[in-house]
Amino acid sequence: MEQRHFDIVNHATPRLESMDRALGRGKYTDDLELPNMAYAALVRCPYSHAKVLSIDVSEAEKVPDFLGCALPEEAPQAYFNCSGNPPSPLLMADEKVLTTEPLTIGDRVAVVADGIPADQKHRHRRRQHHAGPPLHLLQPPHLWRSGLAYCFKTGGSICHQIPNSPVCRAIYYSDVATALIAYEEEVEYIEDGETHRTDLKSLIERHSVANGLACHEHLPILVTRFFVPAAEEGECSGFYKYAMRTTIDFPIINFALRCGGNRLARLAAGAVAPHPVVMAETAAKIDSDATDDEVIAQAEAELRKLAMPIKETCMTPAVKRSLYRHVAMLLDLRK
């Protein structure tokens, strides 16, 4: 086989900001303090498919150094899309800056601002701390956490997706992880001063079992390298993603398939559980003489066992299950 050389692929690309971020020296917007700086907070709707009939700002006006509130009728009514960076005409314009008809939980309905100078901010916060519960609207994350308990991922004891669940049941939305798991990718990481190497699927599942707290307490690691096996002669692979938008968006479901060649087929599915799942039984069907319809039926049956669907912002479990058959979009790779 001819050896090909690439300028970008298979070469490390150093990122200038990586060391500062890894060592905690990175500066973010929230770290900035400027003279006479004002502070603003978004008021987000806790309900989906709602209609805001009125907004009472009287309590906000009692907060010291209150500057004002911006309400939906005072904001531009044009639609836009905040996903694009840079903006693209291909993105669906489906959001307003502030809305009276929130579609999803967390949609913006108002903005509140106050004018506590930066050189008095910390003294003001200490004074409030000793006086009792903070009234200041702009002390993240207490503003919205006061009405929404901390979940497992943030050190709490509840799963907001499944309130009676003893563990985190949040869906793991990732495109890259699903694809890498289909390739049997491995990851190298440092833990407790020692270098380890394991498959990516095991590392993500370990994180999931730790209720999502892995990056803070249960799994203090530094990932150093990824290893993706080279494709063998005759192999082919593909990735399929179904999402609400056709551009940048979280997956509703995705599949990655590697087949052909001398290795056994490998099929992974994502956005169906707290971690991507490997569909070994369906992969075996793909390697066999089974028809496409038989493979699809096997995929649906296997995902009914492996997946853990929940009620998502724009998707019920029943609708999610109806999408399991979308594995059919990759079956042309068998030919």
Image (tube, grey):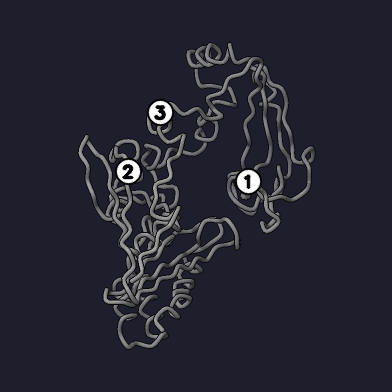
- Foreground pick, 284 / 218: 284
Residue at the spot 79% in from the left edge and 37% down from the top edge: 74
Q: Which residue is mark 2?
A: 223
Q: Amino acid at mark 2?
A: Val
Whole-percent x, y for residue 130 in the image? 48, 13
Identify the residue shown where x is 53% and y is 11%. Answer: 123
Cα distance between the residues tagged 2 and 1: 34 Å
Write down the quadrant of residue 39 in the picture.
top right
Query: Where is 149 relative to 271, above or below?
Result: above
Q: Quadrant of residue 13?
A: top left
- Which marked residue is nearer to the observer: mark 2 or mark 1? 2
Q: Amino acid at mark 1?
A: Asp
The CA distance from mark 3 to mark 2 is: 16 Å
Q: Earlier in the sequence, mark 2 or mark 1?
A: 1
- Choose between 147 and 113: the one closer to the eye: 113
Give the labeled residue for mark 3: 24
Residue at coordinates 54% horizontally, 26% vertically from top-left?
139
What amino acid type should be assigned to the residue bearing mark 3?
A: Gly
3 or 1: mark nearer the eye: 3
The disc label shown at residue 107, or none? 1
Marks 3 and 1: CB-CB under 8 Å?
no
Residue 304 showing in the rendered view:
no
Left or right relative to 125: residue 278: left
Instruction: Identify the secondary structure beneath mark 1.
Output: loop
Question: Is residue 319 visible to the viewer in this orientation of the structure?
Answer: yes
Please, what secondary structure does the residue beneath circle 2 have? strand
Q: CA distance from mark 3 to mark 1?
A: 31 Å
Q: Secondary structure at mark 3?
A: loop
Q: Earlier in the sequence, mark 3 or mark 2?
A: 3
Q: Quick one: label 3 or label 1, which is nearer the N terminus?
A: 3
For disc 2, the neighbor class at 10 Å (few under 14, some 14 to 19, many from 20) is: some
